[in-house]
Image: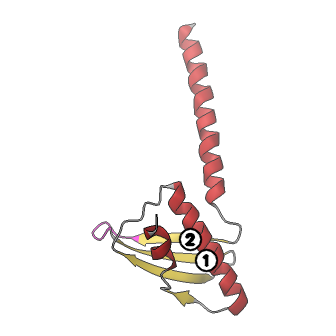
Amino acid sequence: MKKQLLIVLLAVSLSSYSRAQQSQTQKCLSEHGYWTVESNVKTPKTSIIYFYNNDNVMVYKEKVDGFRLKINKTKTRMRLKGILEQSVTAWEQKHIFSENNLLVATALKNK
């Protein structure tokens, strides 16, 4: 009886944890596009971040040097989402690809 109760409690807590994680992930996603990060194990303090719109067109690219990106943190993902939306809006107005405007570096260093 105790074993069944423990299993039920464990299942309930896992499902509530899963829902909480899913809502945080949904909060970090943008309706305007997506971003990807390219990094290397040998040079962890150098990353290249690519921002794309929903049509899979690259709208912005930035190389970040000097600090490690902590992609698992919600705060970092939310800042990247903001930069993505800003970049997609700028691209929609001018249809010009931009690169290395230091948007990511200033947003993430000013924690």
Q: Residue 35: percent from the left, percent from the top?
A: 56, 71
User: What predominant SS class does the magenta segment belong to?
Assistant: loop
Q: Residue at x 51, y 82 (%)?
A: 61
> Measuring 65% from the left and 48% from the top, which residue is drawn there?
23
Label 1 residue SS: strand
Magenta-colored span? 39-44
Mark drawn on residue 39 = none
Considering only order in the chain, which callout, 2 or 1, is on the residue closer to the N terminus? 2
Q: Which residue is mark 1?
A: 52
Q: Is residue 35 above or below residue 95?
A: above
The answer to whether residue 99 is magenta is: no
Horizontally, residue 40 falls left or right of residue 48, namely left
**Does the image show residue 56?**
no
Q: Amino acid at mark 1?
A: Tyr
Q: Residue at (62%, 42%) from the top-left corner? A: 20
Q: Nearer the viewer, residue 38 or 26?
A: 26
Residue 30 visible in rendering: yes
Based on the displayed image, in which of its 4 quarters is residue 10 positioned?
top right
Q: Name above or below for residue 91 compared with residue 65.
A: below
Disc sitting over residue 35 in the figure: 2
Q: How many marks?
A: 2
Q: Position of residue 49 (x, y in %)?
A: 48, 75
Distance between the Cα atoms at labels 1 and 2? 6 Å
Circles 1, 2 touching at the beta carbon (< 8 Å): yes
Rate crowding at label 1 as few (under 14), some (14 to 19) or many (20 or more) other CA atoms within 10 Å: many
Q: Residue furthest top?
A: 1
Q: Residues within 10 Å of mark 2 (few under 14, many from 20)?
A: many
